Image (cartoon, helix red, strand yellow):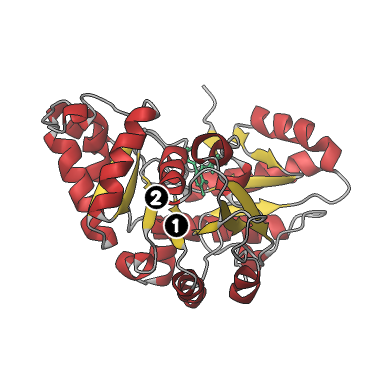
Amino acid sequence: MTRVSDFRSDTVTRPTAEMYEAMARAELGDDVLGDDPTVNRLEALAADMLGKEAGLFVTSGTQGNQIGIALHCKRGDELICEFGAHTYNNESGAMVVIAGAQPRPVKGKAGVMDPAEVESLIRPTNIHNPRTALITVENTHNGAGGTIVPLENVRALGEVARRHKLKFHLDGARLWNAHVATGISLKDWCRDFDTVSVCLSKGLCSPAGSILVGSRADIERGRYLRKQLGGGMRQAGILAACGLVSLTKMVSRLAEDHRNARTLAQGLAKLPGVTVDLATVQTNIVFFALPNREKELPQLLARLSDKGVLALALGGRVRMVTHHDVSHEDVALALDAWKSVIG
Ligand code: TLP
């Protein structure tokens, strides 16, 4: 069988051997009744690591974000988010359906919004306007290429939110990568936010699951919303056992993924007709373009796949993501495959 190097996402990883063992040994209960000890441990650990009062194990990053948004926005409220945000572009319009909130996107630079611009978009109170209720940030920013939203920017946006009594939510699906790349503690990254959603299945090898953290009161209400969304899982300790391995063993190794992404990006930049903005390659995501060959992308990716390398076409560009299950050799293989496919 040909070896497959799957760079489509850091969600494609399989559970590690330690996770399979943890699943087999996990102490279980019924989490809807609140007595699954493994889920309770995971929620408490995540809350502690991120510096918040409480945590809620949810099915996915989308569910974590949407519960966060629904906690802070009433029907008809508006939230300010970055133009390329996952919550705005890739969550199937959920904020409109679930919270009933409408987005006010702001075009950022590499995913970073200008605090003055954000502040200028906050609606004055009158009967014509929707009420601005929430500012959201995505860190790292997937659509911008895994870029890090700098801490000073987070602080400045948090300041705007507080000044206008708005809530502040972080889509921290890949906050781990920002933490490892900068050395800034998770607690520091989370300090300004009311709620933070983090993923266990992106880069950290868990098969499923995310955690929403925040105040005890928000998380209590979040538990109710999770039930409404059908996210109440019973012996969820099976999954939480993997989550505990993710949080305790899998975070620091992300540095290796970052090194592999850099090698991949530098190699791609040397190929004829490939455009990569190396400045945006800050963590584990590489976006690149093949100018004037956008229409050929499906065929090029199919030929790449015949060579055992998988990548994704997103918005006219190619995205490749490094993770636990692709090695330095896979990167070399991918570069060779691209070389021959590009012709
Ligand atoms: N992102 C997926 C795709 O949906 C694009 C990926 O392969 O990167 N926030 C961010 C920043 C994300 O990148 C994702 C997943 C989510 C939230 C949603 O997580 P899930 O898929 O668990 O709902």
Discs 1, 2 touching: Cβ within 8 Å: yes
Q: Residue furthest top?
A: 1
Q: Which mark is residue 197?
A: 2
| Residue type for callout 1 | Leu
Q: Where does the image place residue 68, in percent across and percent down from the top left?
A: 41, 48
Quadrant occupied by the C terminus: top right
Q: Quadrant of residue 80?
A: bottom right
Which of disc 2 and disc 1 is earlier in sequence?
1
Mark 1 lies on a secondary structure that is strand
Residue 272 lies, with reference to residue 99, above or below; the image says: below
Q: Residue furthest right?
A: 292
Q: Residue at x 82, y 54 (%)?
A: 273
Asked whether residue 145 is in view, the answer is no
Q: Is residue 338 above or below residue 285?
A: above
Q: Is mark 2 within 8 Å of ligand 1?
A: yes
**Residue in view at x 62 percent, y 50 percent:** 103
Between 99 and 75, the residue placed more toward the observer is 75
Q: Nearer the viewer, residue 226 or 141?
A: 226
Q: CA distance from mark 1 to mark 2?
A: 6 Å
- Residue 223: percent from left, percent from top: 29, 38
Quadrant of the rendered image containing residue 342: top right
Q: Classify 10 Å Cα crowding around label 2: few (below 14), some (14-19), many (20 and above).
A: many
Viewer can see residue 132:
yes
- Residue type indicated by callout 2: Ser
- Assign a secondary structure to mark 2: strand
Residue located beneath label 1 in the image: 170
Q: Is residue 227 left or right of residue 41?
A: right
Q: Is residue 187 above or below residue 309?
A: below
Mark 1 nearby-residue class (10 Å; few <14, some 14–19, many ≥20): many
